[in-house]
Amino acid sequence: MQTITDKDFIDFIGKQESQYIMPASHWADDVIAEFNGNNVAQGDLLPWSKTHNLIVLRPGEVSLWGGFNGHGKSQILGQAAAWNLKEKPWLLASMEMPPRKTMRRMIRQVAGSSRPTDEYITRFSKWTDGRLWMYDQVDTVEHEKILGMVHYASEVLGIKHIVIDSLMKCGFRGSKDQISSKQVDFVDRLCWAAKHYNNHIHLVHHMRKGEGNQSEYNRPGKHDFRGAGEIADLVDNQFIIHRNKRKEVMVGKGEEVDDSIPDATLECTKQRHGEWEGLLKFWFHEESQQYTPDANNRPLPYGI
């Protein structure tokens, strides 16, 4: 019987990994494309023109979408999904909202109206066939099942954008340290899946609030994501949505407000393969449930 030595084992591993070792010049054409700006179009855009030269949703990446509970994370992602359906298929896995509610809000956003006709609803719903899928689970789902869903959606359906809403609904149990460790491992596997299937995964995640009744007034930062800091480290992009609750309270009391003050902000706090990070202002159009790019507050035409 032949004895396998440590050297034999490391030689075997070395041969396995040799397929990934290439001369640096192999990427010369890709580098030229990067310098010429040809990489900009290699991804999908958000609905608003002011974001188009700043933010790209690239294949093979994971984006973390954060914000306080009720600050519009799912809402703004639904608007982005509807905008991109003409070009790329999406799957929305919202374990916090029934599919009919998700569709109702998206149809309002696309129609630009709080009460689209039955005919419009039917036509739009049929138009989404082959473009939009829903994961019909409104409950906590084991994270292994979520990974299975990602595999099926990517491999069988050819989905290019998958929204997982949210991390806290992905069935992590145990002590605080155990949950943190499992979440980090899960996000790491999502990053692998995005690269392996060459699609974009959007992960919704809640953020920690400060103390006091006015804690929602303060915009959170990139260090305020709940759980282990490694989660934010692993993902490619981070976006933070924050509603102007102070303005909402003033409006609710009938107080005069400056319309130039935004209703919400979208902050990009990380973009691993992009050069821009910063804050963008938005206004909310109640009837359509759309976030609009300026104080004119007109809903975007979707042309669907």
Image (cartoon, rainbow, N blue to C red):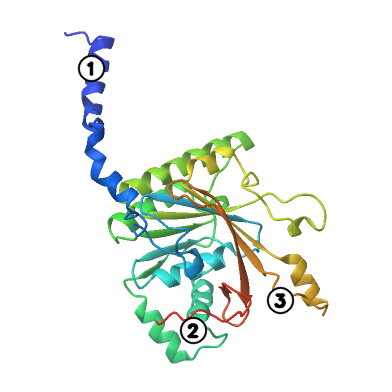
Determine whether, in the image, residue 86 is placed left or right of residue 186: left
Residue in the image at 22% along x and 20% along y: 12
Rendered position, 241 above or below 131: above
Please give the residue where the numbered disc 1 appears in the rendered image. 11
Mark 3 to mark 2: distance in Å? 24 Å
Mark 3 to mark 1: distance in Å? 68 Å
Residue in the image at 68% along x and 49% along y: 208
Please give the residue where the numbered disc 2 appears in the rendered image. 111
Residue in the image at 46% along x and 65% along y: 46
Q: Earlier in the sequence, mark 2 or mark 1?
A: 1
Mark 2 to mark 1: distance in Å? 62 Å
Q: 185 or 276, which is in the foreground?
A: 276
Q: Earlier in the sequence, mark 3 or mark 2?
A: 2
Q: 290 or 52, which is in the foreground?
A: 52
Given the image, on which type of amino acid does mark 1 rest? Asp
Q: Residues within 10 Å of mark 3 (few under 14, many from 20)?
A: few
Please give the residue where the numbered disc 3 appears in the rendered image. 259
Determine whether, in the image, residue 213 is placed left or right of residue 209: right
Q: Secondary structure at mark 2?
A: helix
Residue in the image at 63% along x and 79% along y: 286
Q: Position of residue 59 (x, y in %)?
A: 36, 54
Q: Secondary structure at mark 1?
A: helix
Q: Earlier in the sequence, mark 3 or mark 1?
A: 1
The quadrant of the picture occupied by the C terminus is bottom left
Given the image, on which type of amino acid does mark 3 rest? Asp
Q: Position of residue 228 (x, y in %)?
A: 59, 39
Q: Please report contact status of discs 3 and 1: CB closer than 8 Å, yes or no.
A: no
Rendered position, 111 above or below 52: below
Q: Please report contact status of discs 3 and 2: CB closer than 8 Å, yes or no.
A: no
Q: Position of residue 58 (x, y in %)?
A: 38, 55
